[in-house]
Image (tube, rainbow, N blue to C red):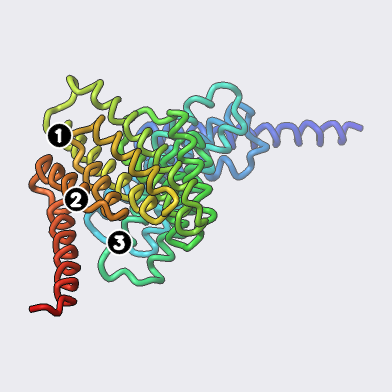
Amino acid sequence: MKKSIWLIVLLMLTLGTTTWAQNSKIETGIIAYQNNEFKKALDYFNEGLLNKAELSAKNIPRAYYYRGMSHLKVMGEEARAMAGKEPSEEQAKALEAHLLGANDDFKQSKATDDGKWGKKVTDALNQYVNVAFLQSGLMAINMTYGKGVTPEQKTEAYKGAVEAMNYSVEIDATNYFPFDLRGQAKLGLADSVGAHADFTSAARLIEANTHTRPDLLIAYTYYRKAIIERYNQHNVDVALATVDAGKKALDREWAKLVAKKAEAKPDQFAKDQKQYEDCKEDLGKFELDLLLNAPEKLQQAIDKFKDATVKEPKNYVLFVAYAQLLEKVEKLDDAAGVYEKATQIDPSKQMAWFNLGAMYVNKAVKLYAEANKITDN
């Protein structure tokens, strides 16, 4: 009996010592973190979390949070050490391991949260981890446009972008940008169905106005979505509706910038205005392409563009589009007049001049052919 009691007491003392030891590793890790000894902190947290069952309940989410932050700090140190250099495959994998480790740790911290760590974890995920995923996805896509990039390298980059955006969407499913980036990567992988689903999700979030800063480039979310609807789904009506929605969304973003014009620097506002005009022109050109290739919609398109030129008498793109439609239905004299107005709106742009010249050349060719048929000298 006495022997049994002593064994129980000894076992209890041993368990208490082990629990204390595990918790002390977490405390030591936090001190190391606060002293900017991030690699040491990681080692302590790794040891302390090996036997999670022996940690006190309050220390579990705390340990995961600080280990996640340590991963980020070490990742930052290693990235700065190789600044300006091309990282080796091993170095790139180490950086990726820290980022994924931080992501996993913050998720574990949130899952075991005792009510004190939720906001800190959410802030860390959004401000650090998600930003890193978004940057890596954007860099991967940009890499595919580089000179000398092989098809195999492009495929790997697109796959990497999809993987990074999967994590980003998991962190914040209210942000349109990762859906748009993932859609672009899926397009690169010839997955038009998956890409369309992502662009649709991105457009829905844009309509819900979940983004906080004005962003004129959202126009291209609709542009890419409409491209798939036109060329993969062969649905001109849906594509036209998407372009129209994109033009309205673009105008909403521009209105936000105009409302803050007094706060903006003049050169930045000028750049924004140029970007707005470029985005609007691209959407307008694609809308025109859709209408020109849908004969049953030509008269509807002519009426629409005629009204639009009255409302926007200085819109170069509208006038060129209207003239092209008139040319399509053989109203050449009317088309020439509209092209002339476009050249007056912006003499520096080439399209109206070129189209007007080409139209006159074509007219001259027809007249010359008719003249050749005359036999009476």
Q: Toward the viewer: 342 or 126?
A: 342
Task: Name the outermost residue toward the front.
Answer: 376
Q: Is residue 47 visible?
A: yes
Q: Horizontal and vertical percent for residue 303?
A: 34, 39
Task: Name the outermost residue toward the right.
Answer: 1
Q: Horizontal and vertical percent for residue 269?
A: 17, 31
**First in sequence: mark 3 or mark 2?**
3
Amino acid type indicated by mark 2: Asp
Asked which secondary structure carries label 2, the reply is helix
Q: Horizontal and vertical percent for residue 53?
A: 67, 37
> Would you place residue 258 above or below residue 166 in this image?
above
Q: Toward the viewer: 231 or 153?
A: 231
**First in sequence: mark 3 or mark 1?**
3
Which numbered disc covers residue 270?
1
Q: Residues within 10 Å of mark 2 (few under 14, many from 20)?
A: few
> Would you place residue 126 above or below residue 325 in this image?
above
